Amino acid sequence: MTDTAPTPSAHQPAGPPSAEPRHFWRMFAIWIVLSAILDPLFYFLVGPHVPPGTMTSSAAENQLDFNILFVIALPVILAVWVYLGYSIIMWRASRKDAPEPVGGEAARTNLRVQTAWITVTSVIVLFLAGFGTYELIQNYGAGGGQGPNPIWKPTASHILPVQVIGQQWKFTYRYPTYGGFETQQLILPADTTIAFHVTSLDVIHSFWAYQLSIKADANPQVDNVAYTTTRQLGRFTVRCSELCGLWHGAMYNFGQVVPKAQFDSWARQTELTTAANTRLLPPFAWTYVPDANGAGGGYYNNTVDPYSPSEVYGARQPAS
Amino acid sequence: MSFGGRLSTFLVLLAVAVGAAVYAVVTFLTPNPQVVDFTGAQAVGAPVDLTVQTVGAIGFGKHPTWVSYLVKDPGGQWIHSTVWKVPAHTRINVTVEQYDSGSPLRNQQWGLVQGTTGGTASLNGTTFSVYNSYDANGVGHTFAIPTIGLNVPLVGVDPNATNTCGAAPCTTNYVHNVMRFSFTSPGPGEYPWQCFVPCGLGFLYGNGGPMSTINYMGGFLDVAA
């Protein structure tokens, strides 16, 4: 080190200093233009196609939530990218006449910028937390399982209960208002509020009806309730989204939303054709007790001891 | 020993340990059962005859006490395999020799015959569409291909019979039930099949062990174009 070590000012070009461009306003202008173009483009062109679609009330609300989140987040992302891009171009080290240190004195700290950034981002986060909570409440759980005692219940006068029974490795469905028949098919009527009662006969599964925007864990001896209202006809996919063993990947099926009359016809017909088997099923209950000991029967109303008194293979259980 | 020598020894031992670990994991994850091919066993478009048996204990191999399926290959030999290759869109005539005892089903829904031709199966020549698993000897296993909605309950034999089969392959001299049904194979692809009776005795909820190991109570229907 010597006394003649260069200082930042020593790098300033000779001659009268040129007026510094109004960098903030330039960046602001770029940002506002990009935001004004990209936000509506996303909302109107991409938004309607954002998963999970609009097949049910919960799906439509969740799509709206995703779109609102994106529309709010996009300007924030753009602000960061514009600042980054502008900085790379305007204050690159190789640029002629670049002030030292890069960005000049004002880049070291700027109380107004920091305050504005913290305030704006805090307001956005708080708003989104409030918005998300509102959407969760007014949409009766937004398609998520609320457990056996739902806090937010739909006000519809007619609610169709459908029981979803997870078992390794298939979902089956019971319709208590049609004699409690059980089937491998999930058929739903259009324009109807559905209460899914999700449970399991063995390990933990998760009922995920993707296009319906329903996702609820299936736990043994738990009645996990999720609501939605069907809006559009069509096919939807059901998958297990909880790793549940060897054939977890194959634990899927396709359901269908059909017109009310068609649903009623299907349900009555299925009730009739499966009557012989329905008589052999246990009476409808919100949960059942699986036999933890193996193959010996079991699929009981939740009123008996869950465990067999005997671990002998094939032993009959108390309720059988 | 020099530093170089110690380092070489360490690296060799490390390589052996890593190799052994990888081999163990790969072996565990890829049981790689033999594929039994039925695609060339008959004329194109003609039905495929698939004969299998279920036994309470396979009697050999790594898990001799495990319950298992076996299949009769086109040459008539019993093979311990659960991966069967069949042609697409073809009638498959299935015969199951069921040598295992039964119990009530955990879910009687699987007592319902579904997805077969005519929605029925036969038990020792008697056609049925629903089997009450609380009757007689209950249901030993089910043959199910869930992704195409196929399910057939396989009725259990009398566990107190004097001539129960102890180890595979079983012959028809032992007490058994003959189940028959047909279905049409779907389009090309791999379709997992399984049993819905939690017959993995000693495992939680009965669905571990043989229920969770390919080549015992589950496998693939490998449908060729």
Image (spheres, coloured by chain):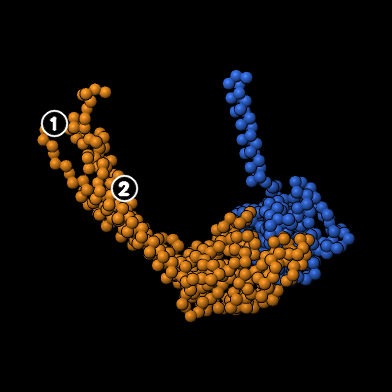
Chain colours: A orange, B blue
Closest to the observer, A176 or A286: A286
**Residue reaching furthest front?**
A3
Foreground pick, A107 / A312:
A107
Determine the image quadrant of residue A40: bottom left
**Left or right relative to A295: residue B190:** left
Horizontal and vertical percent position of residue A169: 63, 60
Left or right: A248 as drawn, with respect to B118: left
**Residue at image coords 13%, 37%:** A17
Q: Quadrant of the N terminus of chain A?
A: top left
Viewer-side label of 2, 1:
1
Residue at image location 55% in from the left, 78% down from the top = A264
- What label sits on residue A81 in the rendered view? 2
Q: Depth check: A72 or A33 in front? A: A72
Identify the residue at horizontal 62%, vertical 66% (top origin).
Answer: A221
Return the residue at label 1: A14
Residue type highlighted by circle 1: Ala
Disc 2 to disc 1, how far (Cα)?
34 Å
